[in-house]
Image (cartoon, rainbow, N blue to C red):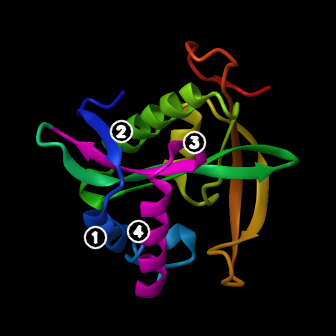
């Protein structure tokens, strides 16, 4: 776990700046086909706010780090289907000044614990770019199994291709057990 105290809270109206600093930054988005437009960030912000009202349908969270619980990025989950199975897909972004300190791993672990308690899906998926070594390392650290790679369109509707790894985690059927890797 991160040596820095990490927690999460539901994504809120005042959190758009985090998306602008992560999704709107060419360096941050180098492994995801470049930065998103201001218009697309606005739409994503609205979607994140809507998602954060009912955790059973997916949710977005603001990552808080350190003794002052400073906003450090976001992490979330949403329903997704892969290979004929429905599960939770996860994604995360961490601001540059908070990277390389285990914060994304700790926040992702917190969200896995939350969705495990929902008991709605046992499958958790992540699709980081094959070039995004830190995100792929997070998946390995948290017990996901690399199930392959695929080329997909990202962002959706852009006609731009992105090669991603397919990471799967199967949660135990009991809400009290720790996550384990899928077979």
**Residue plotted at (30% across, 37% down):** 7
- Callout 1: 10 Å neighbours few (<14), some, many (20+)? some
Which callout, 3 or 2, points at the residue further toward the start of the chain? 3
* Cβ atoms under marks 3 and 1 closer than 8 Å: no
Gap between marks 3 and 4 measured at Cα? 29 Å
Where is mark 1, residue-wise?
A: 17
The percent position of residue 63, horizontal first and vertical second, equals 32, 47
Residue 19 image position (x, y, % from top left) = 37, 68
Quarter of the image where one finds residue 68: top left
Left or right placement of residue 78 versus residue 44 in this view: right
Q: Secondary structure at mark 2?
A: loop
Q: Which residues are magenta?
A: 38-66
Local SS, label 3? helix
Question: Which residue position is annotated with label 2?
Answer: 102
Asked if marks 3 and 2 touch (Cβ < 8 Å), the reply is no
Q: Residues within 10 Å of mark 3 (few under 14, many from 20)?
A: some
- The residue tagged 4 is 28
What whole-number distance in Å separates the C-alpha atoms at marks 2 and 4?
17 Å
Task: Where is residue 64? Give x, y as percent.
Answer: 26, 45
Give whichever of 73, 45 is nearer the camera: 45
Question: Disc 4 on helix, strand or loop?
Answer: loop
The answer to whether one can see residue 35 in this image is: no
Label located before the other in sequence (2 or 1): 1
Residue at the spot x=42%, y=62% of the render? 49
| Real-space Cα separation, disc 3 to disc 1, in angstroms | 26 Å
Tell me: 118 left or right of 182.
left
């Amino acid at each position: 776990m991160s040596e820095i105290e990490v927690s999460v809270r539901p994504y809120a109206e005042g959190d758009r700046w985090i998306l602008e600093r992560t999704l709107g930054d060419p360096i941050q988005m180098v492994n995801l086909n470049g930065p998103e437009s201001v218009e697309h960030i606005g739409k994503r912000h609205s979607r994140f706010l809507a998602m954060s009202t009912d955790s059973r349908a997916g949710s977005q969270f603001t990552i808080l780090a350190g003794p002052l619980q400073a906003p450090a990025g976001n992490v979330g989950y949403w329903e997704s289907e892969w290979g004929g199975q429905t599960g939770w897909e996860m994604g995360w972004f961490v601001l540059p000044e908070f990277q390389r300190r285990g914060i994304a791993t700790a926040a992702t672990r917190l969200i896995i614990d939350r969705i495990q308690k929902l008991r709605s899906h046992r499958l958790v998926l992540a699709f980081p770019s094959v070039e995004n070594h830190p995100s792929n390392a997070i998946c390995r650290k948290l017990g996901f199994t690399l199930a392959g790679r695929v080329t997909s369109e990202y962002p959706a509707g852009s006609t731009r291709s992105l090669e991603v790894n397919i990471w799967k985690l199967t949660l135990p059927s009991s809400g009290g057990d720790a996550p384990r890797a899928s077979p």
